[in-house]
Image (tube, grey):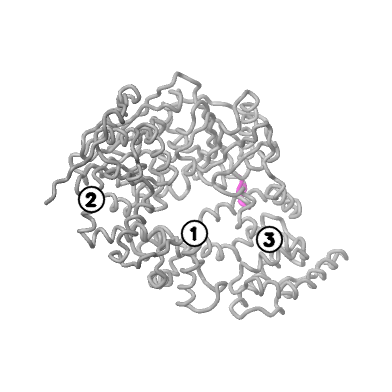
Amino acid sequence: MAREYVIRPSATQMPRIAFADELNPQQLAAVTCPPGPALVLAGAGSGKTRTLTYRVAYLLENGVQPGNILLLTFTNKAAREMLERVAGLVPHDLSELWGGTFHSIGNRILRRYPQEAGYQQGFTVMDREDADELLQGAILEMRGGKVSELPVKPSVVGEVLSYCVNVGRSVPEVLPERFPHLEEWEEMIRLAGEQYRKRKIAANALDFDDLLSGTVRLLEEHPQIAEIFQSRFQFVLVDEYQDTNPLQSRFIDLLSAKHRNLMAVGDDAQAIYSWRGADYRNILSFGQRYPGAQIYKVEVNYRSTPEILELANSAIDGMQTPLRKELVAARTSGELPKIIPAQTGGQQARFVVSRLLELNDSGTRWSEMAVLYRAHFHSMELQMELTRAGVPFQITSGLRFFEQAHVKDVGAFLKFVVNPSDEVAFKRMVRLLPGIGDRSAQGLWKAVEPLGRELVQERQSGGSGFSFSQAFEGQKVPARSAAAWRQLGHTLEEIAPGGVPVSPVHMLRSVREAVYDDFARTKFPDYDVRREDLNTLASFASQYENAEEFLDQLALMGGADQSPVVRDSSGESLTLSSVHQAKGLEWKAVFVIWLTEGMFPSQRSLASADALEEERRLFYVAVTRAEDDLYLCWPFIKRSAGAGDAVQRISPFLEAIPEHLLEEWKISGGFM
């Protein structure tokens, strides 16, 4: 056997890093730890990226070759940032160092051994749109018919199948727990998955899940290939380990099996992604899977004031975890976090806007402030107030509330009965029905347009004898659409009896219950979230008796002319974000809104101890985004569509915080 000789870099090429001068003692201990499995518990704002970066630099300075290091991250951006920082610390050629997302590393491995993995050379990697199209073809081949006749949207089926792959469970196992609204389509989804796999093989195409599942299968079924990579990767480093799912965890374990030099960096208190398959138990059981593993705690926080951190530590005092840690502030003292009770969601929104304007006037830039919430629909009233006040804002979670597809869908029903000449509203409405696409919608519009003119004339003459159900009954529609078309006529008659629209809140409730709920269940993977959005929209609509006024508000709040109004010369914007999407970010001033039981924590989480624990961690993530100022808001009255006002309880997470850690603000004014 040939003897291996490794060329070492010369000393003149490697100026030594003064690690002890550039790292605090906790970071230094983790960075310079001896070989072997290590779990680094890096708290919020404690320099996690710095710790990982210096660990890679430390390995390189101590003779480990770049090609023997694997760095796994959840985003390409994170990998690039870390490798750029490493390149700035050491003068090594890092081209041989493997760093990237789980999927990108899986792709590199599969490209080297495609046939052994069951694929052909030159396979294609599909993006989500391509994958949905192939899945759509599989479903159509299995069921026949047209795209518009599919009972469940391909993207929804894809979401279920992807979740199954990542958690290692079958369709029948995950549907009742994760997608209960799709249980009636269990067999179709399962068979669609089988057809989809066959189509992928025939097309020599892989989706993103295959990049990981195919690699794991390759390593498990071909030990000699696994040996190649296990020997190569002498040191494996993993970022955000608490967010790994079972498939990713298996991937890590396989690649670390030989040398066991695995450094997993994460924070059990920030494990908030179980809904997409992440398994909190991976970080909790690290020591059991890697006997002898050392645990390093990095608890010095450089982001927040001591007062904010004391509240954050208090928030997770009751968290059930064997991995205890406590954040310690590196900064000097600041102000106490504020708790702000408000009477209603509207008053809460007006307080937030008022305080934002004050902070901005006193020198805090818009980009240095954020408003966080548990779910996107919580921001509806706030978006309205910000728009009225001319405050520039951006939404990290996507479209503004009134621009979302499901909000515009139900709005189309109201628009049509108010203005039966609205062609766009009519077509949007009927395309929601099974079996009706663009061509059918156009044909129906030509038939219905004269009826619209008839209704307009009826209204002008003061009559109320028009009947939507009778008018729709005589139209020719595809056979598969007949029942839904009749139901549409009855629904329009219900929301505008005799052609006269009822109140907006009653219209919205009728549309959702009679038509839209069934549509949304099979078209959106986040059906529950969208249902809450529509409930919130109905609560907002209860302020209006007149449908035209309500629709005017929808148009003004969601119109294309509502670009942010820039109040300063920099063109910056305030950030509105769900807490999930705020993870990893920070702002000088942070407002957390709707901190009430059933909102934050969410209503669904109250029935499960595990889910409630995750909500607690989510609250911890929210408060640790703040650097200087933290405002915790909760309205004790919630408007409910058609059910009167509901009194709300303060969030149990706020209730558990000792009074001396908070300054209560009593607000007045701000009523409509």
Secondary structure of the residue carrying numbered label 2? helix
- Give, as a single range, the part of the protein colored magenta: 639-644
Q: Nearer the viewer, mark 1 or mark 2?
A: 2
Name the N-terminal-most of marks 1 and 2.
2
Q: Secondary structure at mark 3?
A: helix
Residue 607: image x %, image y %?
41, 49
In this rendering, the label closer to the viewer, 2 or 3:
2
| First along the sequence among labels 2 and 3 | 2
Q: Which residue is mark 2?
A: 230
Mark 1 crowd level (few <14, some 14–19, many ≥20, 10 Å Cα): many
- Which x, y percent locates residue 190? 39, 69
The answer to which image quadrant residue 445 occupies is bottom right
The reply to whether residue 104 is in sight is yes
Q: Which mark is residue 412?
A: 3
7 on left or right of 365: left
| Cα distance between the residues tagged 2 and 3 | 58 Å
Residue 134 place in picture, x, y as percent: 47, 69
Q: Earlier in the sequence, mark 1 or mark 3?
A: 3
Which residue in the structure is indicated by mark 1? 525
Residue type at mark 3 is Ala
